[in-house]
Amino acid sequence: MRRRNRNNLVEALELLLLALLLWNFNRIYGQQQDLRPAVGMAETETAGTETQDGARGETDPWKERKKICLSFDDGPDPRYTPQLLDGLAQRKVKASFFLTGKKAEEYPELVKRLQEEGHLIGNHTYSHLQLTRNNREQFKQELEKTNGIIEQITGEEVLFVRPPYGCWEKSLEEELNLFPVLWNVDPLDWCSSDASRIVERVLSGAKENAIILMHDEFPSTVTAALRVVDELQKEGYEFVTVDEVLFE
Ligand SMILES: [Zn+2]
């Protein structure tokens, strides 16, 4: 019984000692902590805090912009592509344009303008041909022909293809050295002349790294696309060319 009492007493003393040590440690460490900002403030005044905030901002994921892509098929169109390009330039937006060889051949100055203004130019076959079970060779030839037409105008290799209607065969990627670009937001702009409706459909499907499909051959598409840019820029989106979201 006595031994147990003594053991209890030892335990109590040990606990007291530990508490004292902790209290002391806290007191000393706490003082040091208190001193730190005071020294920092004295040396650098408020600049110190601002730098810290700035440094945090660079790595803060909430401050990073969400990427999204606008892509336009079936052009270039002499009536509407220039309007669209003016609007995109005003908003400092880069987009991706998938051209048919036929239109590129007809309007080389528009192809040149797309290149000069930093947009991505891709292949959309020569005559808007849909790949089927029976026309693989013709489809391939159209892509090759269109690559040739675009490359002659821009002097740059074409690396991306948007297959009409999304019909593609994987083995063509290596054969042609073309990477297929599909889409995840389709506002069906070609079957509506109501720009507000098109905008609504895009906004309801918009998300980070999405690729929006539109056609720069309708006035309603130009209006809608520029409104979409204004809305999504307000929401913190940054418009980039498709290569920037495909290979992230
Ligand atoms: Zn098309």
Image: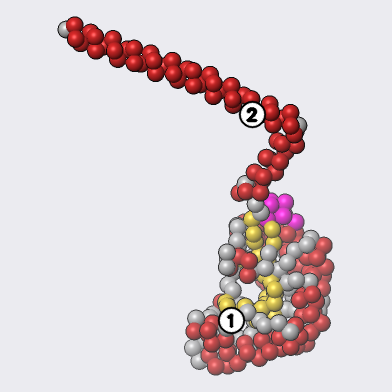
In the image, what residue occupies the spot 78% across and 62% down?
92
Vertical order, 130 against 30 (above or below): below
- Mark 1 C-beta to ligand 1 under 8 Å: no
Instruction: Specify the label residue 178 is tagged with.
Output: 1
- Give the CA separation, mark 2 to mark 1: 58 Å
Name the quarter where the N terminus is drawn. top left
Estimate how packed mark 1 is, as few (under 14), some (14 to 19) or many (20 or more) residues with alpha carbons within 10 Å: many
In the image, what residue occupies the spot 28% across and 9% down?
9
- Counting from the top left corner in percent of width and height, residue 147 is at 66, 86
The kind of residue on which mark 1 rests is Leu
The answer to whether residue 209 is seen in the rendering is: yes
- Quadrant in which residue 244 is drawn: bottom right
Q: Identify which residue, 48 or 108, lies in the foreground.
A: 48
Q: Which residue is mark 2?
A: 36
**Dot 2: element:** helix
Q: Which residues are drawn in magenta?
A: 230-237
